[in-house]
Amino acid sequence: MPPKAAAVYARISSDPDGLAAGVTRQIEDCRAFAERRCWPVADVYVDNDSSAYSGRRRPEYERMLADLAAGIRDAVIVYHLDRLHRRPRELEDFLDLCDRSGIRDLACVTGEIDLGTHDGRFHARILGAVARKESDDKSRRLIRKHLELANAGKVSGGGTRPYGYAPDRLTLVPGEAGIVKEMAERLLARESLRSIADNLNHREVATVTGRAWTTHSVRQLLYSARISGQREHHGEIIGPAAWQPIITPAQTTRIRALLNDPERRTNRVARRYLLAGLLRCGACGTTMVSRPRSDGRGRYVCSRDPGRNGCGRTFILADEVDAFIVAAVLHRLDTPRLAASMRRRAADDPAVASVIQALDRDQEQLDELAGSYGDREISHREWLAARAPIQARIKAANARLNRGQRESALVGILDRPEGIAATYAALPLARQQAVIRAVLNHAQIGPAVRGRNRFDSSRISPAWRV
């Protein structure tokens, strides 16, 4: 008895242009096959640009299985069995479902498979094993090819072009390259990823796909070694690349150290208070938090909320203390001797280069150590013992880089012709915070004098870094 409601399933692994030409041909051949057999086609299920080898979800395949299980489809037509499965495990699950649902008709345009017989299932399993081996061989060749291209510093891969580069992935796009340089400099000046993304979106600077920037897309771009003309493979920088750099390799090292810093604030709401995290209660030493008054005016308080150990007795209005600290910071930066010192320390001086070179040497040593363990020249215990001091040096070097990069917030601030105050006023909040943190370690807020309702600057005791 012929089926009453057949399902046509079509799939193609790669369709980067989104034309769906491959699945269209499969569907046409499957419909022609159904017409010859007088099988009514009840529905067509299509997973375009979807691999059956990777194990990723195939929504339409899952929908077809649900329909087969529900009994509303009683046959399956595919162009070839490997369009349905490339993993023997999936084939066995499919056969089990067919047994439970009473499905006996599975037709392939290129050769019919009768699931109702042992020979038919044996044939299906052989085809499934062959398809898996073909996928394994293809995967191995691709992995070897990409490693070879990486070692040679050549371009590999397709898809969307990287921001800053033309479709050939080698030639710079000047306007976009300028944006990348700007983003790197702003991040190294301690501006937040969120602030950079918001600023680009406000200026209507679009990504390659025309979408808005997010913290993730900004981070992904700046963390990539590609923009400094370096080739990476599986996240590891392995050498120079064939394309032109936009920033220097030293900048990439500093950016990665900054973004990998475990103390870096992530997944938190952007701070709207200038001195958030910088004020301490003079009574108990607890870091004060931002908290608006009932009338909406901002203030900093020593909080006794759950999870905080404050005394709850110290308060100060945000506008007044912010203005006082900003004036004090700008005054210090305008002092000729201090400004000259900060210029030297904010620049890429030999000390920074020395730390970066030491980091590179330690990373090379880690790679050599891993190679020795892989070749069984040393034991696992020896590998662990030798690795510990190297990792400790890397951790210490990254901490030194991050401490040094705090002062990079002052790059482009001290030498502007319009003056420090005007330059500072035009900065976004995150960059203003970074400038203050480069100069100020914290400020202690003393108790208010009862009956004194005006701002009292004597309550503020700054602890300067420089």
Image (spheres, rainbow, N blue to C red):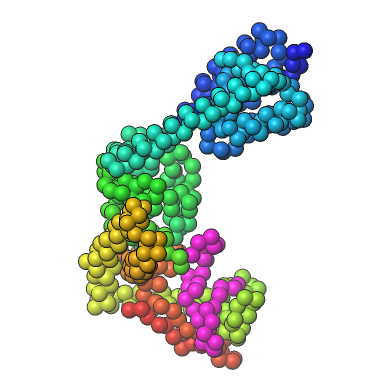
Residue 110, position in %: x, y? Answer: 56, 15
Q: Residue, x 57% and y 84% (percent of image)?
A: 314
Name the side, left or right, on which 315 lies relative to 218: right
Above/below status of 196 relative to 243: below
Q: Residue, x 61% and y 24% (percent of image)?
A: 122
Residue 445 can be seen in this image: yes
Q: Is residue 287 magenta?
A: yes
Name the side, left or right, on which 10 lies relative to 337: right
Between residue 397 and residue 128, name the one nearer to us.
128
Between residue 333 and residue 281, name the one nearer to us.
281
Q: Which residues are magenta?
A: 264-292
Name the side, left or right, on which 94 lies relative to 55: right
Above/below status of 174 relative to 186: above
Asked where in the image residue 191 lies, by quadrant, the reply is bottom left
Asked where in the image residue 381 lies, by quadrant, the reply is bottom left
Asked where in the image residue 448 lies, by quadrant, the reply is bottom right
Q: Residue, x 49% and y 87% (percent of image)?
A: 459
Q: Residue furthest bottom?
A: 450
Q: Quadrant of the C terminus?
A: bottom left
Residue 211, position in %: x, y? Answer: 49, 42
Q: Residue, x 44% and y 85% (percent of image)?
A: 461
